[in-house]
Image: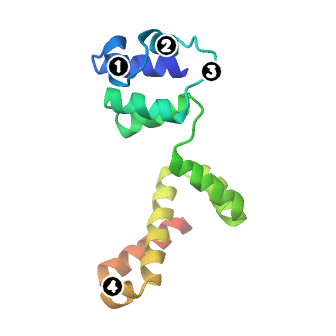
């Protein structure tokens, strides 16, 4: 889906007119109309998308949809991509995770969170038996 089509769908779902959104940004109405009708010849910058997101009261999911439709990465995703290029093992982990089922991803997340807790001094002092059971369950989920 193009950026303009995604924007139009989200804007109309919220019951907002093009003029209202353009006024809130603020942006010239004709420019906003060209943007929504995919007539600018280029996708908007991340900064412009963030202004639109605020103006229409977009949810985090809608924000992600607009960023994706414009070919822009979320800043957090961008920093993870940078980290993956700096640390090959992280990149390999991400490539492997893409092929996992949602259940395996959840088990991997539980395992990673448990490992982080076990590595901290706080966990060593405050760890409960339920934390340990969760860690064991997470490890089993990864082995299935």
Proximity of marks 2 and 4: CB atoms separated by less than 8 Å? no
What secondary structure is found at the residue carrying circle 3? loop
Residue linked to disc 4: 127
Residue linked to disc 2: 31
For residue 71, say whether it is visible: yes
Does residue 4 lie above or below 62 as drawn? above
What secondary structure is found at the residue carrying circle 1? helix
Residue linked to disc 3: 42
Name the spot of residue 28 as percent of width and height, x first. 43, 14
Near-viewer residue (143 or 127): 127
Disc number at residue 21? 1
Q: Residues within 10 Å of mark 1 (few under 14, many from 20)?
A: many
Residue positioned most to the bottom = 125
Name the spot of residue 82 as percent of width and height, x first. 65, 55
Disc 3 or disc 2, which is closer to the eye? Answer: 2
What secondary structure is found at the residue carrying circle 2? helix
């Amino acid at each position: 889906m193009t950026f303009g089509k995604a924007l139009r769908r989200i804007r109309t779902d919220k019951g907002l007119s093009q003029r209202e959104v353009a006024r809130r940004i603020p942006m010239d109405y004709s420019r906003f109309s060209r943007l929504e009708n995919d007539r600018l010849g280029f996708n908007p910058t991340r900064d412009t998308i963030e202004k639109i997101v605020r103006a229409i009261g977009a949810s985090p999911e809608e924000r992600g949809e607009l960023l994706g439709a414009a070919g822009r990465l979320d800043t957090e995703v961008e920093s993870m991509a940078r980290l993956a290029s700096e640390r090959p093992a992280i990149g390999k982990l991400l490539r492997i995770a893409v092929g996992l089922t949602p259940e395996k991803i959840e088990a991997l997340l539980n395992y990673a969170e448990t490992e982080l807790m076990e590595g901290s001094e706080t966990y060593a002092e405050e760890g409960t038996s339920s934390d340990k059971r969760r860690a064991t369950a997470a490890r089993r989920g990864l082995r299935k």
